Image: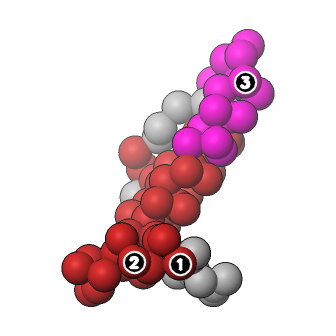
Amino acid sequence: MKALPDDHETRMQRAFCSLEGLAIGDAVGEMLAYRHYQAPEIVAQGLPAGPWFRTDDSEMAISIVEVLKRRGYVNQDELA
């Protein structure tokens, strides 16, 4: 296995921050997807407490970050 990059921890902090933003956006989008015409009112009233659900997009992003954490790069076979 290749050695992890010297700045691996910094990269992973950024990856987790990006993953968190993606997952929140994904959950909000899923919540509003079928009521898009009501989205402004729903957001103005405050988003529901949850649970918020993630989609396959978030699941794929989680898988990519897990491989990055272990390998330091995207290993296609491991990701598959």
Pair 2/3: label in front: 2
Q: Amino acid at mark 3?
A: Thr
Residue 10 or residue 4, whichever sits in front: 10
Residue 5 pos. (x, y %): 67, 17
Q: CA distance from mark 1 to mark 2?
A: 6 Å
User: Total marks drawn?
Assistant: 3
Q: Could you tell me which secondary element the residue under label 2 belongs to?
A: helix
User: Mark 2 — residue?
Assistant: 41
**Image position of 68 with respect to 3: above or below:** below
Question: Image check: 80 left or right of 9?
Answer: left
- Residue indicated by mark 3: 10
Is 64 left or right of 5, judged from the image as shown? left
Classify 56 as above or below 2: below
Question: Which residue appears at 64% of the width and 32% of the height?
Answer: 14
Task: List the residue tagged with mark 1.
Answer: 45
How many C-alpha atoms fall within 10 Å of the one at disc 2: few (<14), some, or many (≥20)?
few
Give the Cα separation between the discs numbered 2 and 3: 38 Å
The CA distance from mark 3 to mark 1 is 37 Å
Magenta range is: 1-18
Q: Is residue 27 left or right of residue 52?
A: left
First in sequence, mark 3 or 1: give its number.
Answer: 3
Query: Where does residue 47 sit, x and y in percent of width and height?
Result: 56, 76
Percent of width and height locating residue 11: 65, 27
Q: Is residue 23 above or below residue 9?
A: below
Which image quadrant: the N terminus? top right
| Quadrant, the C terminus | bottom left
Residue 14 within the magenta-colored segment of the rendering: yes
Classified by dominant secondary structure, the portion drawn in magenta counts as: helix
Question: Does residue 1 appear anywhere in the picture?
Answer: no
Q: Are marks 2 and 3 in contact (CB under 8 Å)?
A: no
